[in-house]
Image: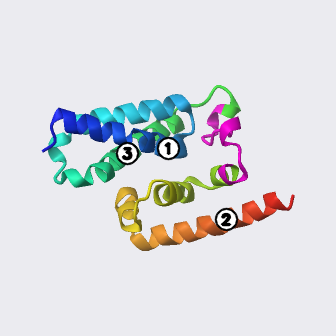
Amino acid sequence: MMDKTEFTAAVLDAEPMLYRIAKTMLGGEQDCADAAQQAILRAWEQLGTLRKPQHFRTWLTRILINECNAILRLRQRTAPYEPEQAEAVPAPTPDDHSDLYTALLALDEKYRLPVVLYYLEGFKTREIARLLGVPEGTVKTRLRTAREQLRKNLEGACFA
């Protein structure tokens, strides 16, 4: 079992990844920070359930995805005051405003999340399948569909 020092080091190492995944799912800065903090707290509380410390990153990511889904469910139950608040996809920031980033944000979450987990975070399709609770073939299909959509969107952006 991990001690407090090992847990802290592992969390600090995973923190940028947690934020990127939360940003992919939630968009808003405050929600991303809340989800990451809640996931870390839950991980600490449930540390005894981690069977293999070498799987900490995958285990923590699953906890984060559950937290993000809880925030998304809460959003669905509460009506926004302004129509713009109902949109989960964030506007690109000037630093991130690239055609690829814009095309990635245009993807539906079921395609965007596997792309981020696979290409940006380095998870294997088998790990992504476990994280998302879908068959590995579904992950591969979503990755292929996402690549096709990205290619189509990027070709349109390049020739526009």
Q: Which amino acid lies under the numbered mark 2 shown in the image of this protein?
A: Gln
Q: Secondary structure at mark 1?
A: helix
Q: Is residue 47 above or below residue 85?
A: below
Question: To which residue does mark 2 refer?
Answer: 149
Q: CA distance from mark 1 to mark 2?
A: 21 Å
| Residue 152 rendering spot, x and y as whole percentages | 73, 66
Asked if one can make out residue 102 in the rendered structure from this viewpoint, the answer is: yes
Q: CA distance from mark 3 to mark 2?
A: 26 Å
Which region shows up in magenta? 85-101
Q: Quadrant of the C terminus?
A: bottom right
- Residue 127 is left or right of residue 28, and the answer is left
At x 48%, y 35%, the residue is 32
Q: Residues within 10 Å of mark 1 (few under 14, many from 20)?
A: some
| Tag in front: 3 or 2 | 2
Q: CA distance from mark 1 to mark 3?
A: 15 Å
Q: Secondary structure at mark 2?
A: helix
| Residue 13 rendering spot, x and y as whole percentages | 35, 41
At x 56%, y 55%, the residue is 112
